[in-house]
Image (cartoon, rainbow, N blue to C red):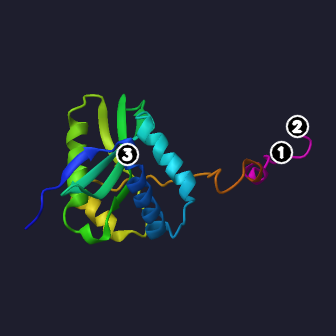
Amino acid sequence: MILPIQIRKAAPGDVAVVTEFNAHLALETEDLTLDRERLREGVDRVLGDAGKGVYWLAEVNRQVVGQLMLTFEWSDWRNGWFWWIQSVYVRKEWRGRGVFQALYQFVEEQAGEQPDVCGLRLYVDARNAAAKTVYERLGMEHTNYEMFEVDFRKTSRREVGKMLVAPTLPPGRT
């Protein structure tokens, strides 16, 4: 028997479970151990300011079994909002039981009801074949975009500046 999955918006009282899920996500997908205090503060800031993002939680029998976060990007090309799906996590014992599908379908339905939302996007680790299969099965398409970043939490701004190389001009040119 499949239990009904309820979707609800996360509230400030959910900071502990969202922090826990994000820590597990980083460790499982990137072998990265996050600073728990910084992470908790970041989650708390999202929970307190919907402009930064919104967490949606999947529950079964009042137990949180999965999450995703939405952030928002304005597209001038499309004159609309892309909703970015991020921080996707499902408890190990609940994987393969429709938890992410329920979250995704909820978000897709919500987005479809908003005339200024032009689409959904997410990024995925290139090595995560299982996740890519799930996203494709839900109707998402692979794009030709790749992601680049400078992470100031990993690399100082001073180090980034040193990486910049001044253009070389021909002799006699200034």
Give the residues drawn in magenta, as a range: 160-174
**Which residue is tagged 1?**
169
Q: Nearer the viewer, residue 135 or 166?
A: 135
Q: Quadrant of the C terminus?
A: top right
| The one of 45 and 111 positioned closer to us in this rendering | 45
Q: Is residue 17 above or below residue 41?
A: below
Distance CA(mark 2)–CA(mark 3): 60 Å
Whether the magenta-drawn stretch holds residue 36 is answered as no
Q: Amino acid at mark 2?
A: Thr
Q: Is residue 33 above or below residue 140?
A: below
Cβ–Cβ under 8 Å for marks 1 and 3: no
Mark with earlier residue (1, 3): 3
Instruction: Mark yes or no: residue 148 visible.
Output: no
- The residue tagged 2 is 174
Which of the two discs, 1 and 2, labels the residue nearer the N terminus?
1
Residue annotated with mark 3 = 13
Q: Amino acid at mark 1?
A: Leu
| Residue located at (10% from left, 64% from top) | 2
Please report the residue visible at 21 percent of the width from the left and 37 percent of the height from the top: 112
- Mark 3 and mark 2 in contact (Cβ < 8 Å)? no
Distance from label 1 to label 2 (Cα)? 7 Å
Q: Earlier in the sequence, mark 2 or mark 3?
A: 3
